[in-house]
Amino acid sequence: MSKKEKKVNIDEEIIIENNESDIDIEFEETEHEGVSQKDKLKKLRDQLKEAKAQSQEYLTGWQTERASFANYKSEEEKKRSERISGMKLNLISDFFPVLDSFDMAFSNKEAWEKVDPAWRTGVEYIHTQFMNTLANYNISLIDKKGVDFDPMIHEPIEHIEVNAESENDTIIGIIQKGYMSGDVVLRPAKVKVGKYES
């Protein structure tokens, strides 16, 4: 067969092997008018490079979006958790006046002792249950006397003159208990503060 006959009878079948640096393309002879094998090979290599670049771009975009979504999901979960925690603390704070009522009832020892012992024991048990539930939610009392005044957790209502310098700026009495959740003050304690004057 002559070279002219080969050129006229090209039936195109392409086999592509993809190596990093080299692309092997085999042609079976078919009919193509005016297009050299070099031009076809160059065109196919260009198309392959373009397809690789596009697929890499899609992969990178997909990975970026996936990471963004994972970050968004994590951030939303954190916000949701903080909202739930805030709602719990608000709900718990609504019960502080009830606890104040318990404290007022218990503080009047004379009247409290006159109440039927069975009823008194029941009320004290309910109060204990209430306080245990608060402890389970990491709620603690601010009710200590004799400690230094701390404006972060104490609200001074009254200053009382004291005889010892060591009692200056210390908590002499609790007017209303305060409550904390971890390091967060839910309600400062209303207190009487000692004032020493030489």
Image: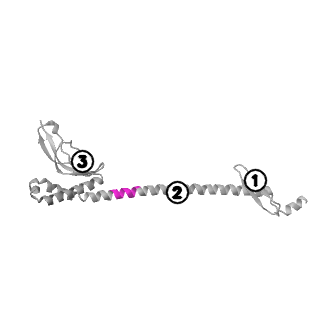
Tell me, for residue 153, which label it has, or none.
3
Position of 60 with respect to 15 (left or right) is left
Disc 2 to disc 3, C-alpha distance: 45 Å
Closest to the observer: 32 or 165? 165
The total of numbered circles placed on residues is 3
Q: Which residues are magenta?
A: 78-85
Q: Identify residue type, mark 2.
A: Arg
| Picture quarter with the N terminus | bottom right
Indicate the position of residue 72 as horizontal and vertical percent values: 46, 57
Residue indicated by mark 2: 66
Sequence-first disc among 2 and 3: 2
Query: What residue is drawn where x is 14% and y is 45%?
Result: 159
Q: Is residue 101 visible?
A: no
Q: Would you say the magenta stretch is mainly helix, strand or loop? A: helix
Position of 114 with respect to 126 (left or right) is left
Indicate the position of residue 160 as horizontal and vertical percent values: 12, 44
Closest to the observer: 69 or 108? 108
SS type, badge 1:
strand
